[in-house]
Image (cartoon, helix red, strand yellow):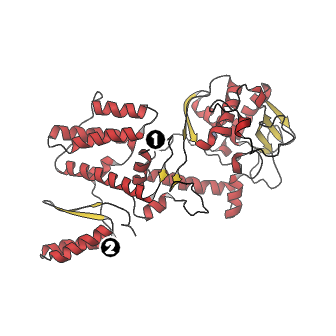
């Protein structure tokens, strides 16, 4: 996973303002501070969502020489040319440019969105590999073509090929990257190496909110922090995301998140109860039919909803009165959770503690029950339920589970 901390232009075009510079000016700090700030926030949020760290996370600003070498290679091969304001990739030198991920030719896709063509380009679709520095550019480097900064597309090709090889298996991105970004990556990489660039592309479709776009102006841009502030577990969002295939595009609504949280809490409660009643996970057998069906679902273009259905099948076993089935179910679930990342094994052992007002109400209810004040106890149970905590009295004492948002308000 790379960090393009320079050269990514607003609107994903060749000319205009660099996103990092816009943010740096807005927050009145230098671009590297901006990059460090949002990288740290991004990684924090990823950790809350149980997303594993990449093995390498190269930054564009650390790889300028690699980009320059790749551009030189393209010039030598006749796929790029030097212009007064930078270096451009000659798209006519790469047959099928712009049609590898989408059969629709680029001129039709861009019809109506045509911007004024830079006269330094030989062809309208040619894209910048290197841009000559403009007055006021906060990030610029020396190059054989004078001072300047790299184009966004070349950064990705230079970094991915450096760490993964000239051909690699999987490249992901958002649906906004089909064109031009990924088509440009394919053209320049394959032109330079003469080898296939990527085996499989997987593009994630946009997250919608309440059926529409997420926009600052509407005020519906939510962060992981907002989810937590409304009393949700960040992993409930992960559960929600897993409920839809990545090519479908998730529609985020608060009721849908509440439903995902109920599902996750239900799973955790059942697992915890199984463990508390003596259940011990047995290692899932490779040939186990539920495990095989789970692997098949994941192998089918990451069909996460089908994978979750297999987890539900394992959960049925967890609830079995037969000890061996219960233990097999636990083993299957914990094994699946290496992919699902819902923190299921952790929830089995550690009982979460209530905090603040929730804890006070829960303790007061215990005290009321102890002295036989069931009216007060019922009032407190209702109060807790309104705060999203369901209390259940079992032979081992009172148990609680989080059922909906609101508990952390
Ligand atoms: Zn990229």
Q: Nearer the viewer, residue 372 or 359?
A: 372
Neighbor class of circle 1 (other Cα within 10 Å; few <14, some 14-19, many 20+) is some
Q: Give the camera-side residue of 41 and 382.
A: 382
Q: Where residue 245 is drawn, which disc sits there?
A: 1
Position of residue 390 measured from the top left corner of the image (x, y, whole percent): 26, 63
> Between 353 and 88, which is closer to the camera in this rendering?
88
Looking at the rendering, which quadrant does residue 76 occupy? top right
Q: Please say if 306 is above or below 260.
A: above
Answer above or below: position of 311 versus 269. above
Please provide percent x and percent y for residue 260.
38, 53
- Element on which disc 1 rests: loop
Quadrant of the drawing holding the C terminus: bottom left
**Percent of width and height locating residue 239:** 40, 49
- Tag nearer the camera, 1 or 2: 1
Query: Residue beneath label 2, please?
Result: 357
Residue at 54%, 44% in the rendered image: 205
- Find the distance from the CA under tag 1 to the CA under tag 2: 38 Å
Residue 58 shows up from this direction: no
At a point 49% along the width and 51% down the height, the residue shown is: 251
């Amino acid at each position: 996973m790379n960090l393009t901390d320079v050269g990514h232009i607003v609107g994903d075009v060749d000319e205009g303002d660099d996103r990092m510079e816009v943010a740096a000016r807005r927050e009145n700090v230098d671009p590297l501070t901006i990059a460090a700030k949002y990288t740290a926030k991004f990684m924090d949020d990823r950790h809350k969502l149980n997303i594993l760290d990449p093995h390498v996370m190269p930054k564009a600003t650390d790889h300028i020489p690699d980009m320059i070498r790749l551009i030189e290679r393209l010039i030598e091969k006749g796929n790029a040319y030097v212009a007064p304001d930078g270096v451009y990739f000659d798209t006519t030198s790469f047959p099928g440019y712009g049609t590898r991920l989408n059969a629709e030719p680029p001129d039709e896709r861009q019809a109506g969105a045509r911007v004024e063509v830079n006269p330094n380009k030989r062809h309208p679709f040619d894209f910048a590999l290197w841009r000559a520095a403009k007055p006021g550019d906060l990030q610029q480097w020396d190059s054989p073509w004078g001072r300047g900064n790299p184009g966004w597309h070349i950064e990705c090709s230079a970094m991915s090929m450096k760490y993964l090889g000239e051909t690699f298996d999987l490249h992901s991105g958002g649906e906004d990257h089909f064109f031009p970004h990924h088509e440009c990556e394919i053209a320049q990489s394959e032109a330079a190496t003469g080898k296939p660039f990527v085996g499989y592309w997987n593009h994630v479709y946009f997250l919608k909110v309440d059926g529409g776009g997420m926009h600052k102006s509407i005020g519906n841009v939510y962060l992981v922090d907002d989810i937590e502030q409304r009393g949700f577990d960040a992993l409930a969002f992960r559960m929600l995301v897993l409920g839809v295939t990545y090519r479908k595009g998730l529609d985020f609504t608060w009721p849908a998140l509440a439903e995902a949280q109920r599902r996750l809490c239900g799973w955790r409660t059942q697992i915890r109860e199984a463990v508390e009643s003596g259940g011990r996970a047995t290692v899932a057998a490779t040939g186990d039919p539920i495990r095989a069906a789970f692997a098949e679902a994941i192998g089918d273009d990451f069909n996460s909803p089908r994978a979750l259905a297999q987890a539900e099948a394992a959960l049925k076993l967890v609830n079995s009165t037969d000890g061996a089935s219960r233990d097999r179910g636990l083993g299957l679930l914990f094994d699946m959770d290496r992919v699902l990342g819902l923190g299921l094994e952790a929830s089995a052992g550690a009982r979460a503690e209530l905090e603040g007002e929730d804890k006070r109400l829960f303790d007061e209810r215990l005290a009321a029950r102890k002295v036989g004040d069931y009216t007060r106890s019922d009032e407190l149970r209702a109060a807790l339920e309104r705060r999203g905590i369901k209390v259940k009295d079992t032979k081992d004492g009172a148990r609680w589970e989080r059922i909906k948002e609101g508990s952390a308000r």
